[in-house]
Amino acid sequence: MPTPPKTKSLLHIEERMSELDPQGMRYKVLEAAKDFKGSWFHLGQCLYTVNKDKLYRQWGFLTFDNYCLKEIGIRKQTAVKLLRSYFFIEKDEPDLVNSIPNYEAVNLLRLAKKNTNIDEDAYKELREDIFTGQKDFSDVKKQFRSLVMASREQGDPEQEHRKAFQGKIRRIISSLKSIKLEVEIKNILPAKILKQVDELIAALEEKLEGVEGRE
């Protein structure tokens, strides 16, 4: 089977790596980003250090978000999930480091743990399904959503407010995506503004995720 062509993001990472000391932290983060799909935990670990020690400032970036986007090609929302999922494994599930699934599944488990209306037995069942790999991520996601919906039926007076708030956010996100698509087709706004729209959509999606998981 022929080797698939490298993406622009991957070529950028490799080019930057060629300019750096292989023993330096900046090189190691890029190396982890290059192998992101197979080693998200290592990348999350590296990014945690970069963010905690503000190393990105030494490398010429004003913010961590800008570093992630420009240096290793991942959006703020993805970086946040990586950091939180890594920290969750280190803090709450350290025994499972050698059997880590994808970071999206770990993020769902983290949100389930924070949801006080999801009981311990339901959490353990979700945890087992995630770490044994018995279910696809799509099935795990449905399972998580079912647990969240069930938790809303327990009579928490705040649940209805959260549900209404989620609906508003979803409608805003949908509208922004439709407007952005139309603007891109007609080419009536500069790339800078489109980028700001992307950032707003990512921020709203992160907010929605937080509400769903009752962070």
Image (cartoon, grey):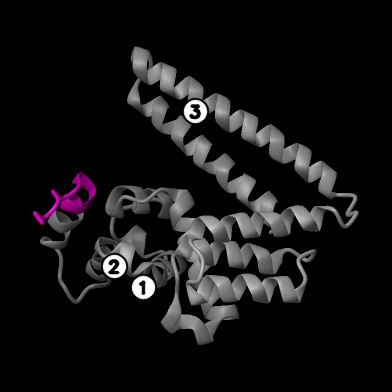
Q: Nearer the viewer, mark 3 or mark 2?
A: 3
**Helix, strand or loop at disc 3?**
helix
CA distance separating discs 1 and 2? 6 Å
Packing grade of label 3 (10 A; few <14, some 14-19, many >=20) is some
Looking at the rendered structure, the kind of residue marked 1 is His
Between the residue at mark 3 and the residue at mark 1, the CA separation in whole angstroms equals 32 Å
Q: Does the stretch in magenta take in 6? A: yes
Residue located beneath label 2 in the image: 32
State whether residue 19 appears in this view.
yes
Q: Which mark is residue 136?
A: none
- In the picture, residue 144 is in which quadrant? bottom right
Give the residue at x 33% y 15%.
Answer: 187
Does residue 9 show up magenta in the picture?
A: yes
Q: What count of labels does the image hold?
A: 3
- Residue 131's place in the image compared with 208, above or below, is below
Q: Secondary structure at mark 2?
A: helix
Label 1 environment density (alpha carbons within 10 Å; few <14, some 14–19, many ≥20): some
Side of 164 where 128 appears, left or right: left
Q: Which residue position holds label 3?
A: 177
**Residue identifier under label 1:** 42
Q: Of the residues shown, which amino acid type is indicated by label 3?
A: Lys
Tell whether 144 sits left or right of 195. right
In this orientation, which residue lies closer to the viewer: 63 or 195? Answer: 195
> Which residues are drawn in magenta?
1-12
Q: Residue 99's x, y, as percent?
A: 44, 80
Q: Specify whether residue 84 is in view.
A: no
Q: Please give the name of the residue rendered at 64% of the width and 29% of the height, measured from the top-left corner.
A: 171
Q: Residues within 10 Å of mark 2 (few under 14, many from 20)?
A: many
